[in-house]
């Protein structure tokens, strides 16, 4: 079963999303990781669709959704996700947000605790002081975006997909990732993580008060040092569970069966017990 994306206009932006409705089933609102798109959920789509009603979203400025500089920060993006859920009439969905979705969904839950029944996050920075490494650290700490303007998006996407273990990225998925960050789109998308220091400092103060149950999933061998961040996040949240998988960064593609099993177990009732 393949995703079948469509578009809507929200806040004046052309936004791409995909749905698979299942009557009387819990709703999963799945937001895109970076530098990927909603097609990152292709390996899990069929198995999750057998149990849940699915909505996958390309966040503004990511995937093939139109961007807005005003939204390229965790707290602003979190507010957009809340508006998107309201626009689709989603009642208390379970938010699924690896990578950049981690900070967006946690900010959304902190600012609008009534929106989500629970969250599944991880593999994205969420605590302050920052615990990151590699290219992500370089993006966040660079004085300006100018050094990254000359980056070839095809090389960036090629490097990202080639590092995904045990997953032969289908041509349709690879092409979508390439189209999502063609031209200046990848350089522009870096703006989001450059807001981590300011927004995550505020978020870290709110995490101990978060009423929303949170499942944290991270790869043990994440090259961006995000396993450490996940452990700190788990320690700060009052209602959370942590699973560390034997994967790199893209656990949702490297081990989709286990990732989907964690989501299924969590949404089917475990979230009520933490």
Image (cartoon, rainbow, N blue to C red):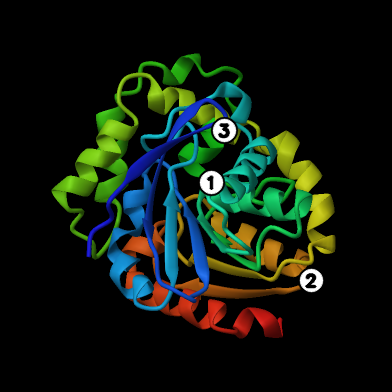
On screen, residue 122 above or below 157: below
Determine which residue is flagged by label 2: 238
Q: Residues within 10 Å of mark 1 (few under 14, many from 20)?
A: many
Write down the quadrant of residue 2 in the picture: bottom left
Left or right placement of residue 210 versus residue 45 in this view: right
Mark 1 or mark 3: name the one nearer the start of the chain. 1
Determine which residue is flagged by label 3: 192
Residue 213 pos. (x, y %): 69, 71
Left or right placement of residue 117 versus residue 26 in this view: right
Compare residues 115 and 100 and report the one nearer the observer. 115
Q: Quadrant of the C terminus?
A: bottom right
Q: Quadrant of the N terminus?
A: bottom left
Mark 2–mark 1 CB contact (< 8 Å): no
Mark 2 or mark 3: name the one nearer the start of the chain. 3
Compare residues 215 and 1 and report the one nearer the observer. 1
Residue 241 pos. (x, y %): 64, 76
**Residue 100's mark?**
1
Residue 68 pos. (x, y %): 54, 24
Write down the quadrant of residue 273 in the picture: bottom right
The secondary element bearing badge 1 is classed as helix
Looking at the image, the residue that sits furthest to the top is 146
Estimate the spatial distance between the alpha carbons at disc 1 and disc 3, rounded to whole Å. Answer: 8 Å
Compare residues 46 and 43 and report the one nearer the observer. 46
**Residue 274's mark?**
none
Q: Residue at x 69, y 58 (%)?
A: 115
The secondary element bearing badge 3 is classed as helix
Estimate the spatial distance between the alpha carbons at disc 2 and disc 3, rounded to whole Å. Answer: 27 Å
Mark 1–mark 3 CB contact (< 8 Å): yes
Q: Residues within 10 Å of mark 3 (few under 14, many from 20)?
A: many
Q: Residues within 10 Å of mark 2 (few under 14, many from 20)?
A: some
On screen, residue 55 above or below 213: above
């Amino acid at each position: 079963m393949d995703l079948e994306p469509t578009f809507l206009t929200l806040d004046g932006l052309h936004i791409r999303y995909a749905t698979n409705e299942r009557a009387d089933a819990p709703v999963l609102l799945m937001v895109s990781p970076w530098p990927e798109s909603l097609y990152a959920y292709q390996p899990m789509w069929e198995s999750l669709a057998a149990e849940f009603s699915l909505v996958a979203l390309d966040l503004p400025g990511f995937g093939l959704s139109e961007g807005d500089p005003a939204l390229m920060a965790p707290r602003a993006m979190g507010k957009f996700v809340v508006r998107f859920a309201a626009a689709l009439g989603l009642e208390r969905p379970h938010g699924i947000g690896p990578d950049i979705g981690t900070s967006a969904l946690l900010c959304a839950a902190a600012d609008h605790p009534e929106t989500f029944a629970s969250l599944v996050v991880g593999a994205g920075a969420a605590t302050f002081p920052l615990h990151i490494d590699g290219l992500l650290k370089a993006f966040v700490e660079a004085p300006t975006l100018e050094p990254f303007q000359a980056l070839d998006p095809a090389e960036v996407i090629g490097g990202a997909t080639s590092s995904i273990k045990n997953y032969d990225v289908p041509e349709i998925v690879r092409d979508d990732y390439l189209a999502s960050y063609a031209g200046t789109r990848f350089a522009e998308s870096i703006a989001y993580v450059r807001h981590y220091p300011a927004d995550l400092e505020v978020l870290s103060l709110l995490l101990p008060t978060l009423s929303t149950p949170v499942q944290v999933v991270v790869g043990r061998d994440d090259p961006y040092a995000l396993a450490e961040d996940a452990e700190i996040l788990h320690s700060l949240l009052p209602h959370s569970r942590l699973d560390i998988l034997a994967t790199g960064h893209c656990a949702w593609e490297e081990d989709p069966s286990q990732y989907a099993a964690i989501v299924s177990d969590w949404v089917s009732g475990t979230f009520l017990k933490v």
